Image: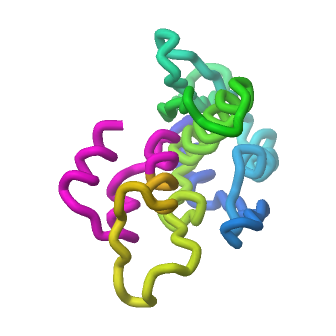
Amino acid sequence: MKLNEKLATIQTKFKSKKSRFNSFGKYYFRSAEDILEAIKPYLLEHGITVTINEELINDSGVIKTTATISDGTNAIHATAIVGVDLDQKGMQMPQRFGSASSYGKKYALGNLFLIDDTQDSDAVNDHGQSAVNAKQWLNRGTAQYNKALDYVKAGGKVTAIKEKYSMSKEVEAELSKI
């Protein structure tokens, strides 16, 4: 079986539970470790390996993470780009890079195995503050805006935030620049 066929088989069968709980936000999420644990049964079954490589881009505080699946002859890669918030309050520099690294791994693996995280609460959770059928406005200076900034800096998509929140063109432009 060709590598792309093996990958397609894995992508259609692969499940990774959200086993981590965020007590502040009251939601479950999955980590890179959860994804790696869930992929292990497929390795020997399909004769493949999965690796993750990280690269700091130009000392800019941007990390490029590449997840690779290989059968020893061929390889398929998926990447994620995440920013490190160098001014993050309350974190030491190693924690800032570690946090960005974790996000990068999670999203690179998600890209490789087609894990849909658009419903992942760590990305767009409003902690129950919006009305059931109405979108809350995303305003500068709010906790939700800061979470949206962190999400985009970690490689998240502005379109996912727009599914949850209404926002002005100015706010959308600010988030899109990150």
Q: Is residue 43 left or right of residue 6?
A: right
Q: Magenta residues, as a range? A: 149-178
Which of the colour schemes (rainbow, by chain, secondary structure, one colour) is used? rainbow
Q: Is residue 84 magenta?
A: no
Q: Residue at x 48, y 31 (%)?
A: 81
Q: Residue at x 56, y 43 (%)?
A: 107
Quadrant of the snapshot with the N terminus: top right
Q: Is residue 51 above or below residue 27?
A: above
Give the percent coordinates (x, y) of residue 54. 61, 22
Comparing 48 with 159, the one in front is: 159
Give the percent coordinates (x, y) of residue 18. 71, 63
Q: Is residue 16 above or below residue 128?
A: above
Predominant secondary structure in magenta?
helix
Q: Is residue 32 left or right of residue 55?
A: right
Q: Residue at x 76, y 51 (%)?
A: 34
Quadrant of the snapshot with the C terminus: top left
Q: Which of the 4 image quadrants contains residue 40?
A: top right
Q: Is residue 166 magenta?
A: yes
Comparing 63 with 90, the one in front is: 90
